[in-house]
Image (cartoon, rainbow, N blue to C red):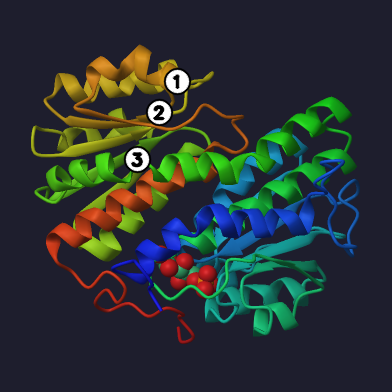
Amino acid sequence: GKGQYRHFMQKEIFEQPAVVGDTLQVFVNPQSRAVTLPDLPIDFAKVPRLTVAACGTAYYAGMVAKYWFEQIARLPVELDIASEFRYREAPLPDGGAALFISQSGETIDTLAALRYARSQDQTILSVVNQPESVIARESDAVLPTLAGPEIGVASTKAFTTQLTVLACLTIAAAKARGAIDAAREAELSAALTEVPARCAELLNHDEAIQAIAHDLAEARDVLYLGRGAMFPMALEGALKLKEISYIHAEGYAAGEMKHGPIALIDETVPVIVMAPSGPLFDKTVGNLSEVSARGGQVILITDPRGAERAGEHAAHVIEVPEVDPLVAPLLYAIPAQLLAYHTAVVKGTDVDQPRNLAKSVTVE
Ligand code: F6R
């Protein structure tokens, strides 16, 4: 049941500290804080390239992972939407590995992508939430998310547990490839171990986010902007808002703004900027001030340092704890989910069963 919550989606958002913690326990030894994966049928030191395919929110988890694998593990990644990948007959490298991400493990396009990769002699890994599913059965190795049953059609806890598994996989790959030293590994594992506590802190901002959602509910169009691993988070934030509130929303790489979307900006368009302080922050602040100069209403999601430096350009600031860049996407997911959730509640839509959508897409 929903217990004290009004919707399954809300309950599932609030379960995230617990289920991310459960998922971490599978991969991180609490004493040594070392990441240990189950025995994998591949040697990350030798894999020439990782192919990743998935749909929807699971695809955005894969896109975050592409940034991680490439930056942290120095492992080249090819990422595609499963419905495209299955038909584009991409050549895949000898000795390559392919990774499929799916909550249900039953998504038809993801399964077809997996079977294509199998036909090309790739080693198949999957990140799935349903261990009894067909994608799990057809994989050489399964990395489970322990999100528990996800009832709300909009994916929340499945997404953050996917990110948790993918972050562990990144650390293991980085170690195998000699891309990080023991000190950095310890730092990354420690940052991951602290995610459940940081998520719980963030969930305490629920009421402040609810207040902002009242403004958002008035909008016809909403833009989400991010750079680096925050770009897929912007795409995910926009997907969450559109699917449950039916407000038109788009995610963009912040640097793409001036290549087109800035033409849309006026005082009626809220722009949600997801920007942790760090090396890319000043660039994103540049985009943010361009938006506010055109009357755009900026909702800035950042950490305390970012808020101090750029808060003046924003109509609202949502503060997220400052964390290692590896784990930032896990935290920024939460305000994006809460904004979408509360906006949908204000609009009175059917949050758990949005129109036209099914929880798992088993036909093309
Ligand atoms: C969005 C959403 C969908 C799913 C997509 C993939 O909130 O739920 O975009 O993420 O249909 O589903 P799975 O992960 O079951 O393959």
Neighbourhood count class around disc 3 (C-alpha, 10 Å): few under 14, some 14–19, many 20 upward: some
- The percent coordinates of residue 129 (x first, y second) are 61, 71
**Amino acid residing under circle 3:** His
Question: In this picture, is 19 found above or below 195?
Answer: below
Q: Say whether marks 2 and 1 touch (CB < 8 Å).
A: yes
- Horizontal side of 228 relative to 125 (left or right) equals left
Question: In this picture, is 191 found above or below 294?
Answer: below
Q: Determine if residue 83 is in view.
A: no
Q: Which quadrant of the rendered structure holds the C terminus? A: bottom left
Circle on res. 205: 3
Circle on res. 302: 2
- Horizontal side of 312 relative to 3 (left or right) equals left
Helix, strand or loop under label 2: strand
Tell which circle, 1 or 3, labels the residue nearer the N-terminal end.
Answer: 3
Neighbourhood count class around disc 1 (C-alpha, 10 Å): few under 14, some 14–19, many 20 upward: some
Helix, strand or loop under label 3: loop
Q: Which residue is mark 1?
A: 281
- The percent coordinates of residue 214 (x first, y second) are 14, 47
Q: Nearer the viewer, mark 1 or mark 3?
A: 3
As rendered, which of 100 and 119 lies closer to the eye?
100
Q: Say whether marks 3 and 2 touch (CB < 8 Å).
A: no
**Residue positioned 24% across, 77% down in the render:** 355
